[in-house]
Image: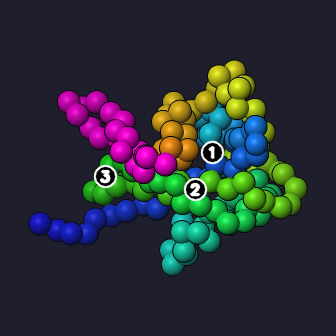
Amino acid sequence: MARTEKVELTVLCLVYSENAYLLQDRVKEDWQGFTLPGGHVEIGESIVDAVIREMKEETGLTILNPRLCGVKQFPIQDGRYIVFLFSADEYEGELISSDEGDMHWIRKEELSNVNLVSNFNELLQVILNDNLNEFQYVIEDEQWKIVLK
């Protein structure tokens, strides 16, 4: 049995203040709605460097001391897609938007009033709950199922 597989590495980051989350109103058709900013890890790039770079590119902010909070994963053809989930409440710079979507500070109590991506609440649970580490999509009976661990 092979012990290696094709893997696509990405990062997402929950940038937050006391009462609001920085969310991206994502425009790409594959995952539309309000979600966390992020992107791909470049070949040879450290995971931490990738999240800092992606936040700068998509938000204009330089995040400080990003904290790894968990992992999201799902199967892809011949392998898996892995998303390293970070949070950061320290940042500097001026907020911008990017081609990926417009950035908005959304108050926590207003989350139900915006069009969140389909798995946002489970993603947030893994990031905020110290007892959870993993968000995994598994396929059972040809249906995608979310498992939190």
- Judging by the rendered image, the residue that carries numbered circle 2 is 86
Looking at the image, which is closer to me, 57 or 67? Answer: 67
Whether pointer 2 and pointer 3 mark residues with C-beta atoms closer than 8 Å, the reply is: no
Q: Position of residue 50 (x, y in %)?
A: 60, 67
- The type of residue carrying mark 2 is Phe
Element carrying mark 2:
strand
- Judging by the rendered image, the residue that carries numbered circle 1 is 36
Q: Which mark is residue 91?
A: none
Residue furthest out toward the right = 94
Magenta span dominant secondary structure:
strand
Q: Earlier in the sequence, mark 1 or mark 3?
A: 1
Q: Position of residue 51 (x, y in %)?
A: 62, 63
Badge 2: few (under 14), some or many (20 or more) residues near its Cα, within 10 Å? many
Element carrying mark 3:
loop
Q: Is residue 140 magenta?
A: yes
Q: Position of residue 113 (x, y in %)?
A: 69, 21
Determine whether 64 is above or below 128 in the image: below
Q: Position of residue 86 (x, y in %)?
A: 58, 56
Determine whether 131 is above or below 145 in the image: below
